[in-house]
Image (tube, coloured by chain):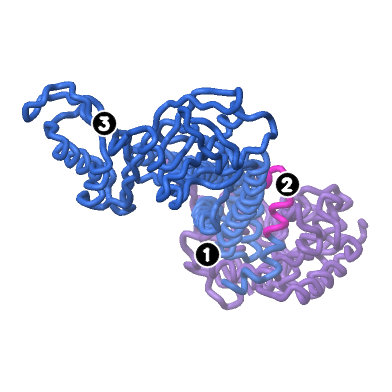
Chain colours: A purple, B blue
Amino acid sequence: MLKIHQLHKSYAIGDSSLHVLKGIDLEVESGEMVAIMGSSGSGKSTLLNIIGMLDEADSGEYILDELPIKNLTEKKAAVYRNKFLGFIFQSFNLINYKNALENVALPLYYQGMKRKERQKKALFHLEKVGLANWAEHLPKELSGGQKQRVAIARALAANPKLLLADEPTGALDTKTSYDIMNFIQSLNDEGKTILMVTHEEDIANMCKRIVRLRDGVIMEDKKVNQVRAEQYV
Amino acid sequence: MLRFLLDRDTWQEVFDSLSKNKLRSILTMVGVWWGILLLIGLLGSARGLENSFNRLFGSFATNSVFVWGQNTGKPFKGFQEGRRVVLSLTDAKKIEENVEGIEFVLPRSQQGKAVTRNFLSGRFQTAGDYPLLDELQKKKLIHGRFINQSDIDNRKKVAVISKGTYEQLFKKDEEVIDQYIEIDDINFKVVGLFENGNVNMGPSTDIHVPFTTFQQVYNRGDQIGWMMITGKPEFDIKQIEEDAKLLLKNINNIHPEDRRAFGSFNLGKEFAKMTGFLTGMQFLTWFVGIATLFAGVFAIGNILLITVKERTKEIGLRRALGATPFEIKRQIVIEAVFITLLAGLFGIITGGWILIALDHFFGQGDDAAIVNASVSIAVVFVAMVILIVLGTLIGLIPAFKATSVKPIEALREE
């Protein structure tokens, strides 16, 4: 599903350069649920951004679903992102003047889908996250948990191969966090491949595999016994 | 591209992002609206002034020069300096025959005369005139008619009097036509009553009588007071004036370089000055209007730029969700064009209202300062095209700015 080999990335900071990723090797199979952990500055967000084609590696190999991701034009990257990836962010990143349904339908809009079809599909995904009744509401009328659910519905809308979550519970209280994790686990149960960045141990333990980064290299990569979130809900 | 423009989603996006922040959208529009409003308002008023000017002078043959005799300034062929020069009908005829580009030569004689009627009397400027005068300086007749050819041919003793004269010689509301007035002890029948216009060229006249009658009854023979020379439109009236004066000097034994012998007033020259002034004003109007328009469009660009900065995160998100840089740019440009056009349309409409108001308050009646203040459709069309072009260009700046930020930077948590 996802293959990364000897990935390097450095950022220029003034005159010097900061070597953030120092040769990452990572393989993720279809249906896995991986947590990437590490202290801030360990390079976990950079790794996620490269996997999400929001950023480009300096050297190394990145193959997504047998497709080498290399030297993409902005346009091509946009198409790939739309087709293969679903993003979930810490701060939800919903467009505040669009209602829940329109937010979910946005990736489909960029796919060039017709309006009616788009709305039908968006409503289907909203139903899936249990917010069909909130379709016409603006983000400011939703709670944090609801906003993240809308964001998840949006990430699912284009039916991506890989879900990328950047601290999906970072802005939520514990109860809501478990609630969201419960939902993400159910998605994984259905076969979605999920990659998330987190620094919370309990959230990481709800995944099936934990990859720990420190100073740009993988320190540890182990399978864990998944803690089901539903027992806390 | 056309499909994109006809797509409902496109406009939904534009509408959403504009109505999201109404204050911002409105402030943005004010700049362009004001520019167009000024352009239309100024152009319309300039046109109105020009129209009123043309109406004022429309009744005059503006390509004219008045020439009269004075005293010679140089001795010539045995004549001494200071000789009185009196123009004659022969002079007028010679000019008409010999100077190139002449349309008419109209001789006139005028003197102050004592006029009485019953027990009322006064002193009035009385002139001998041809019917042609009515064509060159349109008389506004209240009653009756102007002098006609039959009056000239038969040397009829008829008079056309001004309203001022009527008010002095007649009682209020008294019948004027076919009444008799006495000019220097000779009875004339009044056949017309006219009103003096706002603008008079040459000395004003109170009473017009047939030219032939005037010459005969007041013993003037061949002598005339002055002549009005009108050139054909395509000829330069200054050249005609020079040619005519030279010819007159030649006929009347006056030194060719004598500058004092003839007095003249070149209407064409004065008129050209006025039209030049109007042209200048119109240029100024265009300049101010277009400059304001530019300022407005730049204001839009400026605000869009700020907005883009504000929306960096949104744009980053859209790109993460699969919007290509082109789609983002297209969206921002169409927002810019749309907002510019909308503001422009408002400007055109309100500008129209201003012109209507101007017409209502200053454009009524015969001596209105502004006549038919208006702007041609072509001008409006050109303004719209300028707006679309400027809107597109100015929209490109924030559009490129928006896509120059990598989506990752836009989405970075602060």
Residue B16 on the magenta span: yes
* Boundaries of the magenta span: B14-27
Q: Is residue B261 above or below residue B179?
A: above
Instruction: Please tell me whether the stretch drawn in magenta is mainly helix, strand or loop.
Output: helix
**Alpha-carbon span between mark 3 and mark 2:** 75 Å
Amino acid identity at mark 2: Lys
Please tell me which residue lies in front, B211 or B155: B155
Check if mark 1's residue and mark 3's residue have beta carbons within 8 Å: no
Q: Is residue A34 above or below residue B297?
A: below
**Alpha-carbon span between mark 1 and mark 2:** 32 Å
Residue B375: where, in percent of width, then height? Answer: 55, 51
> Residue placed at 58% from the left, 66% from the top?
A78
* Quadrant (top left/top right/bottom left/bottom right) for the C terminus of chain A: bottom right
Residue matched to label 3: B69
Chain of the residue where label 1 is placed in the rendered structure: A
Q: Is residue B265 left or right of residue B120?
A: left
> Residue placed at 28% from the left, 39% from the top?
B222
Residue matched to label 1: A74
Mark toward the start of the polypeptide (3 vs 2): 2
